[in-house]
Amino acid sequence: MGFLGVLLPMIRLYLVGVRVLLYQLFNRSFTLPAGNVEEEGLEAVTKIRDETKEGKVEFLFLDLSSLHSVRQFAQRFKATGLPLHVLVNNAGVMMVPERRTEDSFELQFGLNFLGHFLLTHLLLDTLKRSGRHGNHSRIVNMSSATHYGARLNLEDLQSRSCYSSHGAYSQSKLALVMFTYYLHEQLTAGDFPVSTNAVDPGMVDTALYQNLCSPAQLLQRPVARLLFRTPAEGASTALLAAVATELEGVGGCYLYNGQRAASSETSYDQDLQAQLWKQSCSLVGL
């Protein structure tokens, strides 16, 4: 079981990757005219200020692998008194060797999912106050096609019994989709002016692929130049979800290449969604 527990998630993930590459080979990328480290964030602020004299740009540091940092960030943001119209949950790591966060969570589940889960909860009241009917606040959760090959193990969300870097990554992305759908139902039931959608950026040429197995890394480099999306192309569907007028008030969707798409069958399981929600609240202390 140990060997199969590592091998099967890897096979499922690479099969999904091949399917995505075939799609990207025969379909043009959706595009819009269009950091995860403090230095890059500050550089981005400086560039934006240089390019436009209108508006105000600020940078607040946030480490999503630390629940303390998430809570600290939420407090600092709320202290500004600013409204919040768009929250894009985009940070993530992919297929990393087994590691734990300072809160003892498996790193990929902790950073990719639980950090965003807590951040969204802590900022939800601000999002609700900032939105209006006809002008919703928006939450955008960055998932991945790898969620199609994921298995959600509610008995071992931290992958302690058998760690697979591929399985842990795909599970974290499935969790984000399920969180999106469950939160959408909660917001709709309360008639709150906030919409939430999940986004699949496609296979994008970034440094995230450095943890692929050696044969896959050899193939990835030449294939990426031909078939992978550029970072700007990969960001386009997230921007669509964040600002497009045709998605005003529309939530509970899975968006890929600028269009609504069906996510995995498992992601629509409402019982699993509710169980994941309950466990996640307990894990982050809500």
Image: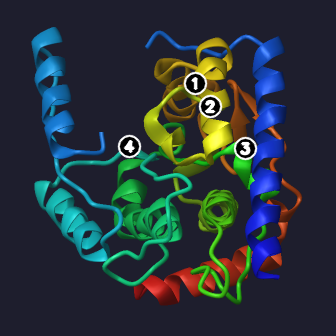
Q: Which residue is mark 4?
A: 85
Q: Secondary structure at mark 2?
A: helix
Crowdedness near tag 4: few (<14), some (14–19) or many (≥20) residues, C-alpha within 10 Å: many
Residue named by callout 1: 221
Mark 2 touches mark 1? (CB < 8 Å): yes
Q: Please determine whether, in this image, residue 182 is positioned above or below residue 13.
A: below
Check disc 4 and report its element: helix, strand or loop. Answer: loop
Residue situated in front as seen by the camera: 178 or 151? 151
Q: Nearer the viewer, mark 3 or mark 4?
A: 3
Q: Secondary structure at mark 3?
A: helix
Residue 34, picture quadrant: top left
Q: Amino acid at mark 2?
A: Leu
- The residue at which mark 2 appears reads as 218
Depth check, mark 4 against mark 2: the one in front is: 2
Residue 200 appears anywhere in the view: no
Picture disc at residue 145:
3
Against 230, residue 167 (above or below) is: below
Cα–Cα gap, marks 4 and 2:
42 Å
Dot 2 or dot 3: first in sequence order is 3
**Hey, what amino acid is under mark 3?**
Ala
As displayed, is residue 130 above or below residue 23?
below
